[in-house]
Amino acid sequence: SKPIVAIIGRPNVGKSTLFNALAGQQISIVKDTPGVTRDRIYADVNWLNTQFTMIDTGGIEPSTNDLILKSMREQAEIAIETADVIIFLTDVRQGVVDADFQVANMIRRSGKPVVLVVNKVDNFKTMMADVYEFYNLGLGDPMPISGNSKLGLGDMLDEVIKHF
Ligand code: GDP
Ligand code: MG
Protein backbone atom coordinates (compact mmCIF):
# COMPACT_ATOMS: atom_id res chain seq x y z
CA SER A 1 0.00 0.00 0.00
CA LYS A 2 0.99 3.63 -0.44
CA PRO A 3 3.07 5.53 2.14
CA ILE A 4 1.11 7.85 4.43
CA VAL A 5 2.19 11.47 4.95
CA ALA A 6 0.51 13.36 7.79
CA ILE A 7 0.46 17.16 8.07
CA ILE A 8 0.78 18.02 11.77
CA GLY A 9 0.90 21.40 13.50
CA ARG A 10 -0.86 23.97 15.65
CA PRO A 11 -4.22 25.42 14.61
CA ASN A 12 -4.06 28.13 11.95
CA VAL A 13 -0.54 27.43 10.65
CA GLY A 14 -2.04 26.55 7.24
CA LYS A 15 -2.32 22.75 7.25
CA SER A 16 -5.60 22.64 5.33
CA THR A 17 -4.39 25.24 2.82
CA LEU A 18 -1.30 23.12 2.13
CA PHE A 19 -3.38 19.95 1.97
CA ASN A 20 -5.69 21.50 -0.63
CA ALA A 21 -2.75 22.82 -2.67
CA LEU A 22 -1.22 19.32 -2.82
CA ALA A 23 -4.55 17.58 -3.38
CA GLY A 24 -5.20 19.94 -6.28
CA GLN A 25 -8.70 20.69 -5.07
CA GLN A 26 -10.59 22.12 -2.13
CA ILE A 27 -11.21 19.13 0.10
CA SER A 28 -10.31 20.54 3.48
CA ILE A 29 -11.99 23.55 5.06
CA VAL A 30 -9.75 26.60 5.46
CA LYS A 31 -10.86 29.12 8.05
CA ASP A 32 -9.35 32.07 9.85
CA THR A 33 -10.77 30.60 13.06
CA PRO A 34 -8.36 28.03 14.48
CA GLY A 35 -9.50 24.46 14.83
CA VAL A 36 -11.98 24.09 12.01
CA THR A 37 -10.68 20.79 10.63
CA ARG A 38 -12.04 18.30 13.12
CA ASP A 39 -11.73 15.15 11.09
CA ARG A 40 -8.73 13.61 9.52
CA ILE A 41 -9.06 14.04 5.79
CA TYR A 42 -7.28 11.93 3.21
CA ALA A 43 -6.14 12.56 -0.37
CA ASP A 44 -3.99 10.72 -2.89
CA VAL A 45 -0.99 12.70 -4.12
CA ASN A 46 1.34 11.89 -7.01
CA TRP A 47 4.79 13.54 -7.08
CA LEU A 48 7.35 12.57 -9.72
CA ASN A 49 5.57 9.23 -10.21
CA THR A 50 5.71 8.54 -6.49
CA GLN A 51 2.30 8.08 -4.94
CA PHE A 52 1.35 8.62 -1.34
CA THR A 53 -1.70 9.22 0.82
CA MET A 54 -1.81 12.55 2.62
CA ILE A 55 -3.68 13.23 5.87
CA ASP A 56 -4.81 16.66 7.06
CA THR A 57 -5.27 16.85 10.82
CA GLY A 58 -6.81 19.17 13.34
CA GLY A 59 -4.41 21.34 15.29
CA ILE A 60 -2.36 20.60 18.36
CA GLU A 61 -2.45 22.91 21.37
CA PRO A 62 -0.94 20.87 24.21
CA SER A 63 -1.15 23.62 26.85
CA THR A 64 -4.96 23.87 26.94
CA ASN A 65 -7.67 21.56 28.23
CA ASP A 66 -10.32 22.80 25.84
CA LEU A 67 -12.27 19.79 24.63
CA ILE A 68 -12.12 20.57 20.93
CA LEU A 69 -8.40 21.10 21.09
CA LYS A 70 -8.05 17.93 23.15
CA SER A 71 -9.88 15.93 20.50
CA MET A 72 -7.77 17.46 17.73
CA ARG A 73 -4.61 16.63 19.68
CA GLU A 74 -5.77 13.06 19.96
CA GLN A 75 -6.36 12.98 16.19
CA ALA A 76 -2.87 14.33 15.61
CA GLU A 77 -1.44 11.63 17.86
CA ILE A 78 -3.29 9.03 15.80
CA ALA A 79 -2.00 10.69 12.64
CA ILE A 80 1.58 10.53 13.92
CA GLU A 81 1.13 6.84 14.70
CA THR A 82 -0.37 6.22 11.27
CA ALA A 83 2.18 8.25 9.31
CA ASP A 84 5.22 6.94 7.51
CA VAL A 85 6.51 10.50 7.15
CA ILE A 86 5.38 13.61 9.06
CA ILE A 87 5.17 17.11 7.65
CA PHE A 88 5.49 19.32 10.74
CA LEU A 89 4.03 22.66 9.70
CA THR A 90 4.89 25.91 11.49
CA ASP A 91 4.12 29.60 10.87
CA VAL A 92 6.87 32.13 10.16
CA ARG A 93 4.57 35.00 11.12
CA GLN A 94 4.10 33.69 14.65
CA GLY A 95 7.66 32.41 14.97
CA VAL A 96 8.59 29.48 17.20
CA VAL A 97 6.15 29.23 20.11
CA ASP A 98 6.04 26.92 23.11
CA ALA A 99 3.40 24.67 21.53
CA ASP A 100 5.79 24.05 18.62
CA PHE A 101 8.39 22.67 21.04
CA GLN A 102 5.72 20.41 22.54
CA VAL A 103 4.71 19.13 19.11
CA ALA A 104 8.38 18.65 18.22
CA ASN A 105 8.75 16.48 21.33
CA MET A 106 5.69 14.41 20.36
CA ILE A 107 7.18 13.81 16.92
CA ARG A 108 10.64 13.02 18.32
CA ARG A 109 9.14 10.47 20.69
CA SER A 110 7.42 8.78 17.73
CA GLY A 111 10.77 8.21 16.03
CA LYS A 112 9.08 8.87 12.68
CA PRO A 113 10.87 10.71 9.86
CA VAL A 114 9.86 14.37 9.83
CA VAL A 115 10.19 17.26 7.40
CA LEU A 116 10.13 20.58 9.27
CA VAL A 117 8.23 23.09 7.12
CA VAL A 118 7.83 26.82 7.77
CA ASN A 119 4.68 28.16 6.12
CA LYS A 120 3.51 31.67 5.19
CA VAL A 121 6.93 32.60 3.76
CA ASP A 122 5.14 34.58 1.07
CA ASN A 123 8.34 36.35 0.01
CA PHE A 124 11.47 34.20 -0.16
CA LYS A 125 13.70 37.28 -0.53
CA THR A 126 12.61 39.32 2.47
CA MET A 127 11.39 36.66 4.91
CA MET A 128 14.17 34.03 4.89
CA ALA A 129 15.95 35.51 7.94
CA ASP A 130 12.90 34.62 10.05
CA VAL A 131 13.04 30.97 8.94
CA TYR A 132 16.38 30.23 10.67
CA GLU A 133 14.80 30.58 14.13
CA PHE A 134 13.09 27.23 13.47
CA TYR A 135 16.43 25.42 13.74
CA ASN A 136 15.80 25.78 17.50
CA LEU A 137 13.20 23.00 17.26
CA GLY A 138 16.05 20.54 16.75
CA LEU A 139 14.41 18.77 13.82
CA GLY A 140 16.91 19.66 11.11
CA ASP A 141 16.69 22.13 8.25
CA PRO A 142 13.47 24.18 8.17
CA MET A 143 12.01 24.29 4.66
CA PRO A 144 10.24 27.53 3.68
CA ILE A 145 6.95 27.37 1.81
CA SER A 146 3.89 29.46 1.09
CA GLY A 147 0.79 27.30 0.89
CA ASN A 148 -1.23 30.25 -0.34
CA SER A 149 1.21 31.22 -3.07
CA LYS A 150 2.32 27.63 -3.74
CA LEU A 151 5.99 28.50 -3.24
CA GLY A 152 8.53 25.87 -2.23
CA LEU A 153 6.14 22.93 -2.53
CA GLY A 154 8.30 21.00 -5.01
CA ASP A 155 11.41 21.17 -2.83
CA MET A 156 9.30 20.14 0.17
CA LEU A 157 7.85 17.12 -1.66
CA ASP A 158 11.34 16.09 -2.84
CA GLU A 159 12.37 15.99 0.81
CA VAL A 160 9.23 14.06 1.86
CA ILE A 161 9.61 11.27 -0.70
CA LYS A 162 13.30 10.76 0.22
CA HIS A 163 12.02 9.16 3.42
CA PHE A 164 9.89 6.47 1.70
P1 GDP B 1 -5.01 25.08 9.71
O1 GDP B 1 -5.82 25.45 10.92
O2 GDP B 1 -3.59 24.75 10.10
O3 GDP B 1 -5.64 24.04 8.85
O4 GDP B 1 -4.87 26.43 8.83
P2 GDP B 1 -5.72 26.90 7.54
O5 GDP B 1 -5.25 26.18 6.32
O6 GDP B 1 -7.16 26.83 7.87
O7 GDP B 1 -5.21 28.41 7.39
C1 GDP B 1 -5.31 29.33 8.45
C2 GDP B 1 -5.14 30.73 7.89
O8 GDP B 1 -3.81 30.91 7.40
C3 GDP B 1 -6.09 31.05 6.73
O9 GDP B 1 -6.50 32.40 6.86
C4 GDP B 1 -5.19 30.88 5.52
O10 GDP B 1 -5.60 31.63 4.41
C5 GDP B 1 -3.85 31.38 6.05
N1 GDP B 1 -2.69 30.85 5.29
C6 GDP B 1 -2.48 29.57 4.94
N2 GDP B 1 -1.33 29.46 4.21
C7 GDP B 1 -0.82 30.71 4.10
C8 GDP B 1 0.36 31.26 3.46
O11 GDP B 1 1.16 30.59 2.83
N3 GDP B 1 0.53 32.61 3.60
C9 GDP B 1 -0.33 33.40 4.30
N4 GDP B 1 -0.04 34.70 4.37
N5 GDP B 1 -1.43 32.92 4.90
C10 GDP B 1 -1.68 31.59 4.81
MG1 MG C 1 -7.34 22.89 9.10
Image (spheres, rainbow, N blue to C red):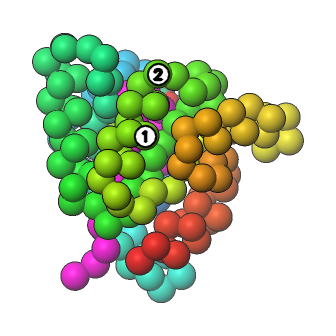
Please name the amino acid that badge 1 sits on.
Answer: Ala
Residue at left offset 45%, top offset 57%: 114
Q: Which residues are magenta?
A: 1-18
Q: Residues within 10 Å of mark 1 (few under 14, many from 20)?
A: many
Q: Describe residue 89's horizontal placement relative to residue 112 as left or right.
A: right
Disc 2 marks which residue? Answer: 98
Residue 130 x, y percent position in the rendering? 74, 32
Gap in Å between the C-alphas at discs 2 and 1?
10 Å
Work out which quarter of the rendered image holds the C terminus and state it.
bottom left
- Depth check, front residue: 138 or 121: 138
Query: Could you tell me which secondary element the residue under label 1 belongs to?
Result: helix
Residue at left offset 18%, top offset 48%: 78
Residue 10 x, y percent position in the rendering? 39, 30
Work out which quarter of the rendered image holds the N terminus and state it.
bottom left
Magenta stretch encompasses residue 4: yes
Magenta stretch encompasses residue 102: no
Residue at left offset 48%, top offset 42%: 89
Residue at the extreme right of the image, as rendered: 125
Residue 17 appears in the rendering: no
Disc 1 marks which residue? Answer: 104
